[in-house]
Image (spheres, rainbow, N blue to C red):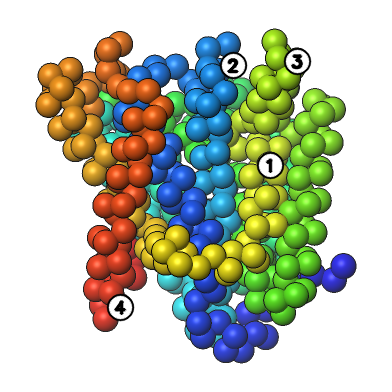
Amino acid sequence: MNIPFANPSQHGNQTGHRLIAVDILRGLVMVLMTLDHTRDFFSNIIYDPTDLTKTSAGLFLTRWITHYCAPVFIFLAGTSAYLSGIRHHDRRRLGIYLFSRGLWIAFLGISFESLIWCYTADFSELSGAVLWAIGWSMMTLAGLIYLPLPAVVGIGLLLISTHNLFDGLKMTDMGGFGPLWAVLHSGETVHLTNKLVLHPYYPLIPWIGVMATGYGCGALVLDKPQRQRQVLSWLGFVMVAVFVLFRYRNQYGDPQPWSHQQSVTFTLLSFINCEKYPPSLLYLLMTLGPALALLPWLESVTGRPGKWLVIFGREPLFFYLLHLPMLVFLALGWAWMAEDYPIPLLLPGFPQAYGYDLPIVYLIWAGVVAALYPLCRWYHGFKQQRQWLKYI
C-alpha cells in the first residue's frame, strides 16, 4: 500500500480548517490523563497499581488505560506540527516556532512540573517528565523538518524500534557520558551538583521517535477520507498484531517479560503490562496502534462529548497547567476538612490512612473534568485574538 508521505507544500489549503478527529483524540487522552493524576492525589493505594503481586484488576486497568496518554499526545504533537507547516507554507517559520515553543515547554517541565511532582519549593530536584519530553522532542523536530518526510519518519521508526537494544547499558557504564545517557535512555537520577538533582522520568530517545513518526502521520490524516480510514486502520491493526507476536515470544521489545499468573485475568494483565519509563517498543505498539485505528472514525463523535473533547484537545497545554494545581489544592482542602492529614502534598509521601477507594476517585475525576470545561472554553475564546498566547 502506497502511503502518501509528501512535502507540506503539496497539500495547499487543505488545512484551512482544524481536523476535528485530531482534536477529539487529543481531548480524550487529556481526560484520561486527569484520571491518572486524580488517582495519584486521591487514591488510598500506596503501591504501584501495575504490581501484579498487590493490585486488583480494576486498579490495574485504571492505571493501564492512561498509558495511552503520553504516546498519543506526543504523536499528535508531531501531527499538528505537520498540519501547521501546511497552513503556513513556510518551513523556516515552522522550525522557529517549534524550537521556541519546545524551549518554553521544556522550561515549564523543569519548573512547573518540578514544583508539583518533586515536593520541593527550592527546586533542588528537577522533574524531567512529560512536558520536558515534549519540549525536547519539539526542539529536535524543528531540525528534522528540513529533511524529506520519509527520512523524518525513518529516523522516528529507527529510534522507536531499536532503543531497547541498549536496555542493558546504564549510566555507570557510560563514563563521562553517563548523565547524558540517563537523559536520553536509561532514566536514572542525575546529580548535577551536590544540591541539584534531575529525575529524567521521560528519557528522550523514544519520545523524539514518537513525535517524528507523528509528523509523518500528518500526511495520512490529510488524505481522502475513505483512503485515510483504510490506511490508518491497516496500520493500527498491523501494529497491534506485531505487539501480540513479539510480546508472546518474550524475546525483544520490552525489558519485562510477561508470565503466567494465578488466573487467566492476571495472565492477560501481565501480557499487557509493558514498560513506560522509558517507553518500550511494545508499549508504543500497544498504545499507538489502537489510537491510529480509532483516529479516522472520531469525527463522528457529536453532541456534548464531542464538543467537550474538541475544546480540551484545542487547549491541551492550558488544560495541563490548570488541572494539576486544581488537584493539588483540592487534595489539600479535602484532607484539611477531613482532619486527615493537613499538608499531604508538602511532604515526600502520603500517610497510610490518606486517600479513598476507586469509586470516590472516579467521582472526583468526573468533577474535575466538568470544572475544567468552562475554563478551557473561556480560554479558547480569549486566546483567539491574542497571538502571544499561542505558546500556551
* Quarter occupied by residue 105: bottom left
Residue type of the residue flagged with mark 1: Met
Q: Is residue 179 above or below residue 154?
A: above
> Which is closer to the viewer, label 4 or label 2?
2
Name the residue located 26 percent from the left edge and 81 percent from the top edge: 385
Front in this rendered view, residue 368 or 133:
368
> Residue 322, position in %: x, y?
27, 51
Circle 2 residues within 10 Å: few <14, some 14–19, many ≥20: some
Q: Is residue 208 left or right of residue 223?
A: left
- Check the picture and name the quadrant holding the N terminus: bottom right
From the viewer's perspective, is the residue at label 3 or at label 1 nearer?
3
Residue 255 position in % (x across, y down):
69, 25
Dividing the picture into quadrants, the one containing residue 274 is: top right
- The number of callouts visible is 4
Q: Amino acid at mark 3?
A: His
Q: Report the amino acid beneath label 2.
A: Leu
* Disc marking residue 52: 2
Find disc 4 in the rendering and name its residue: 384
Q: Which mark is residue 260?
A: 3
Outermost right residue = 1
Q: Which residue is mark 1?
A: 286
Res 308 seen here: yes
Most distant residue in the bottom direction? 12
Please tell me which of labels 1 and 4 falls first in the chain.
Answer: 1
